Amino acid sequence: MASKITYLDGLRGLAACVVVVSHFFQVFAPSVFEGKPEIVHFGFESFVARTPLNLLFNGNFSVCVFFVLSGFVLSWRYFQTKDKIHIYSSALRRYLRLAVPATLSVVFAYGVMLLGLGYFDDIRQTTLSSMPDPFLASSNLPVMIQEALFHTFFHYGSAYNPVLWTMTYELFGSFLIFGFLLTVGRFRLRFIAYAILAVLLIDSYYLGFVLGMVLSDLRYSGRNWLAVIQRPWITPLLLCVGLYLGSYPYVGIENSVYSFLVWKSSSFSFFVFYHTLGAFFTFTALLNSARLQSLFSRKLFSYLGKISFSLYLLHFTIICSLGSYIFYQLHPLFSYGLSVTLTVILTTPFIFALAHLFYLFVDAKTLSILGQWSKRIFDPIVQKRTRSMQMEKTKSV
């Protein structure tokens, strides 16, 4: 089997694009996230925010897709081979794989801040967004370094680049997977452990990692158990249910098609739970659909998958700097709607161009170097183990 599954990259690329769209909405149409009628700019906001149409800008659902994908991707090689070397290799690289690109994205945001190129605060009175200004973070260099290398990965820090709140989940979730596989990955009763973990993490983003690992286990541990539910009507049903749950709105579920999903609770996070469950069902449909796999394997989606991490890391800073500056200049000349439209049209190509360069010179290079480093460490171990097995076979003969 190939070292990468192309259609998974395609899904990741689409999810990253939705996150970009969500932050354009968060800056220029904040009512869809905050539910306040007094900050509505467009007539469609209150309607689309409370219907499945919000999938177009539901960034939190996309983040949950990322987490389910991580659970699947970080475990499938182990389930296919039952070789712990894949776990050790991934664990050794994981922090650096995340930290190098993420840290440079913080450095980029820090540089924009120091140069005074952040214009988000200049347009907030017009856009009415209550989103915190990312360029009000400390200009102290040691504080920035500590934030980039430590708080981002161990304390859910996101002071300079707000999208980095997911990095702690990615790191801890990854090691949750590695620890699970090393301790109970070979036991037949491991599904009991899955159930226990799922109950403990039921309203946490970490549930996504567990569910992704379960799907990987079902697909690659010998028999493909997902094929049992591979029926012409089941896959579309799973997709519809997944997208419906994934479109659970940020606000205003009362008297909507989602109102029956909620029960009285003072602490349960329905928002996280339903988005995670939606990502799980959607991903299950993808794994059982040759058509969806073919779609997400096409060149466009494959390319978006390649640059997805770079796109995710950089877009927010660009929207709050260049995008905000463009809007700041256009709004005195045009209506609000036209100013926003032109801002999106002019800013988006720059986001993708910079993401492409960041992928080439940072993300891809990081992956290549870490891959070579991992091979130097683990290839001799694998070769020694192979020779030992061959010698044992020779003796037995």
Image (cartoon, rainbow, N blue to C red):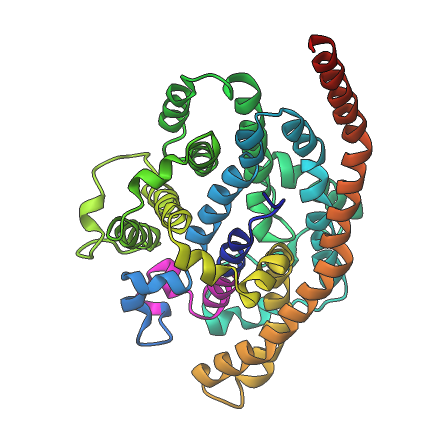
Q: Residue furthest front?
A: 397
- Counting from the top left corner in percent of width and height, residue 308 is at 59, 57
Q: In the image, is 170 to the left or to the right of 383?
A: left
Say if residue 130 shows up in the picture. no
Q: Position of residue 123 (x, y in %)?
A: 55, 72
Left or right: where does residue 166 sit relative to residue 310?
left
**Is 114 in front, or is 60?**
60
Question: Residue 334, percent across and down?
Answer: 49, 89
Q: Which residue occupies 45% across, 67% down?
A: 25
Query: For the point 41% across and 58% down, which residue is it?
Result: 292
Residue 114 lies in what quarter of the image?
bottom right
- Could you tell me residue 26's position as x and y percent? 46, 63
Q: Is residue 32 magenta?
A: yes
Identified at 50% across, 44% down, the residue is 69
**Magenta extent:** 17-38
| Residue 380 visible somewhere in the drawing | yes
In this view, the residue in front, 25 or 215, is 215
Q: Is residue 192 magenta?
A: no
Give the quarter of the figure containing the N terminus. Answer: top right
Residue 197 lies, with reference to residue 101, above or below; the image says above
153 relative to 194, above or below: below
Q: Nearer the viewer, residue 385 or 78?
A: 385
Name the residue rendered at 60%, 63% in the picture.
303
